[in-house]
Amino acid sequence: MISREPSSSRRRFLRTVLVAPIVLASGAWFRWLDGLAAAGTLAAASAPGGARRVAPTPDCGDDDEPTPAETEGPFFKPRSPQRRSLLERGISGTKIVLEGRVFSRGCRPIAGALLDFWQADDAGAYDNAGYRLRGHQFTDDSGRYWLETVVPGLYPGRTRHIHVKVQAPNGPILTTQLYFPDEPRNRSDGIFSQALVMAIRDVDGGKEAAFNFVVASA
């Protein structure tokens, strides 16, 4: 199955993220995509010598298409706990921190948007009896979210992915999945979409990822 090509705005975002490590090399004080920090601000930060850093341009605009929807799958459970970290005792695997923002079309950040995440553990199994590796949260006043979890494992027929439902206050629910770049199974997974690939880089202790959602609002 031929994957959909990312939108022009998504390509711009991926280029911004993928060149970030080059920018970082010029100074350790430049945190990767600091503008996507979970509870921070987009204010410019001071660099040695008095230089000022401008926050990244948001991945949205009047010409942006909403984030593509995908199948819910068989493992969604309602009423997940509200939490930003899915890590708890007994969970193993490579730690990953996912950050981003939720926008409406027209580049308006959405405060109080709901994001409900669920995924397999590092062995490829879902917890269907409880709520391990499941949780929901709400964006802050700037539309930001922040999720701490582990890289999901593989199971037959699917590539690595994280499920999510995103909903602006009183808006329709977007159900979709986020994917990992350069996964061999991306080519054979009939559900995989290139437009839903996260930007990821390796860091000490795990990985950092970024993805911005564009959703319909009320």
Image (cartoon, rainbow, N blue to C red):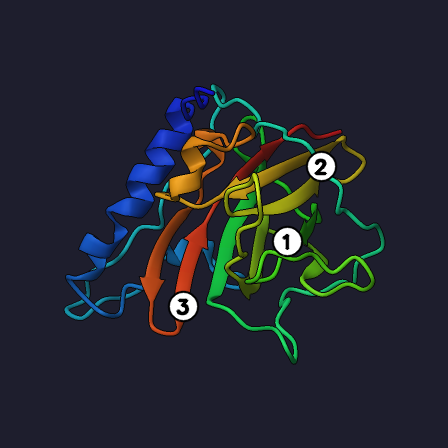
> Is 18 placed above or below 46 here?
above
How many neighbours does mark 2 have within 10 angstroms: few (below 14), some (14-19), or many (20 or more)? some
> Is 125 placed above or below 108 here?
below
Give the Cα separation between the discs numbered 1 and 3. 17 Å
Residue that appears at 57% across and 49% down: 155
| Residue type pointed to by label 2 | Glu
Residue that appears at 38% across and 23% down: 8
Q: Where, quadrant-wise, is the C terminus in this rendering? A: top right
| Residue type pointed to by label 1 | Gln
Report the side of 46 relative to 66 (left or right).
left
Q: Which residue is mark 1?
A: 119
**Which secondary structure, mark 1?**
loop
Give the Cα separation between the discs numbered 1 and 2. 11 Å
**Which secondary structure, mark 3?**
strand
Report the side of 31 relative to 122 (left or right).
left
Image quarter for residue 156? top right
Relative image position of residue 49 (x, y in whole percent): 14, 69
Q: Which residue is mark 3?
A: 206
Q: Is residue 153 visible?
A: yes
How many neighbours does mark 3 have within 10 angstroms: few (below 14), some (14-19), or many (20 or more)? some
| Residue type pointed to by label 3 | Gly
Residue that appears at 39% across and 44% down: 183
Relative image position of residue 20 (x, y in whole percent): 27, 51
Image quarter for residue 103? top right
Q: Which mark is residue 80?
A: none
Q: Which mark is residue 72?
A: 2
The mark nearer the N terminus, 2 or 3, is: 2
Residue that appears at 55% across and 41% down: 158
How many neighbours does mark 1 have within 10 angstroms: few (below 14), some (14-19), or many (20 or more)? many
Q: Which is closer to the viewer, label 1 or label 3?
A: 1
> Is 184 placed above or below 141 here?
above
Relative image position of residue 132 (x, y in whole percent): 71, 65
